[in-house]
Amino acid sequence: IASFAPGAPEPSVPDGRIHHWAGAVFIPGVTLDHVLKYLNQRAGRESDAFDDVLSSRLISRDGDRLRVYMKLRRESVITVTYNTEHDVLYRRINDTRASSRSVATKIAELEGAGTPQEREKPVGNDHGFLWRLNAYWRYEQVKGGVLIECESVSLSRGVPVLLRPFVTGTVERIARESLQKTLVSLRTELAKSRPVAARRAQAELADGYGSR
């Protein structure tokens, strides 16, 4: 989806451009409870699972609300690295559905990333590829597993008319590929977690019988 809503015209943003993409993955053999527990336990350890997260840590936790730091790398024709902080809120809707929302509260592009000279660029003196980033997640228990959907909405700086043929496609591609990588990595990690969940369930069942 490259517009505010399917079939709707793109909203006008002075000196900016909205990038709106949506995707979904199906995770077979897991439950909604397992998915939510996994995501909460792994908060702050995103760098272990996602290739474009170079480092991460949990800043704070208050019930279903989390604050997470992530050092993000975005690659296409050029590579750009950011220090980011995210406010994440989970909501359980009912036995089969849940949602979460992630809002980036800090996005700082880095100069000299990975070197001793690494520093955050002043706001307004960066490439402007990523100014804002929100993600809206939906989780649903369905027959055979869990369906996970994500809508990613990001804001980039407006591109001068003469550069649009060269730059606009790159920025759109970065936004689309970032969501795709996130969903694929999440599916891989949750699929790997299934045997662990199954072994724990079997052990708990065995313990339950043994205590009778």
Image (cartoon, rainbow, N blue to C red):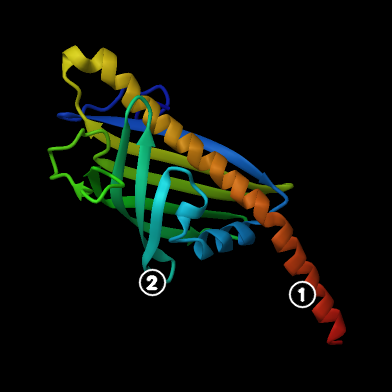
Q: Residue at x 43, y 71 (%)?
A: 63
Q: Measured along the vertical axis of the image, is residue 95 above or below residue 74?
A: below
Could you say where residue 92 lies in the image, as x and y percent from the top left?
A: 52, 61
Secondary structure beneath dot 1 equals: helix
In front of the other: 119 or 23: 119
Q: Judge whether 17 appears above or below 44 on screen.
A: above
Dot 2 crowding, Cα within 10 Å, few <14, some 14–19, many 20+: few
Residue at mark 1:
204
**Left-right relation of 11 to 139:** left
Residue at left offset 21%, top offset 33%: 127
Q: Which residue occupies the extreme bottom position in the image?
A: 212
> What is the x, y in percent for residue 172?
35, 26
Residue at the spot 39% in from the left edge and 62% down from the top edge:
57
The mark nearer the N terminus, 2 or 1, is 2
- The Cα atoms of the two marked residues, 2 and 1, are separated by 29 Å
Disc 1 marks a residue whose amino acid type is: Glu
Give residue 112's mark.
none
Say whether residue 89 is left or right of residue 110: right
Q: Position of residue 13 (x, y in %)?
A: 20, 30
Q: Which residue is mark 2?
A: 62
Percent position of residue 85, x then y: 30, 55
Front residue of 158 and 92: 158
State left or right for residue 162 relative to residue 194: left
Q: Quadrant of residue 200?
A: bottom right
Q: Is residue 212 above or below residue 118?
A: below
Q: Residue at x 28, y 44 (%)?
A: 113
The amino acid beneath tag 2 is Asp
- Is residue 147 visible in the rendered image? The answer is no
Q: Residue furthest front?
A: 116
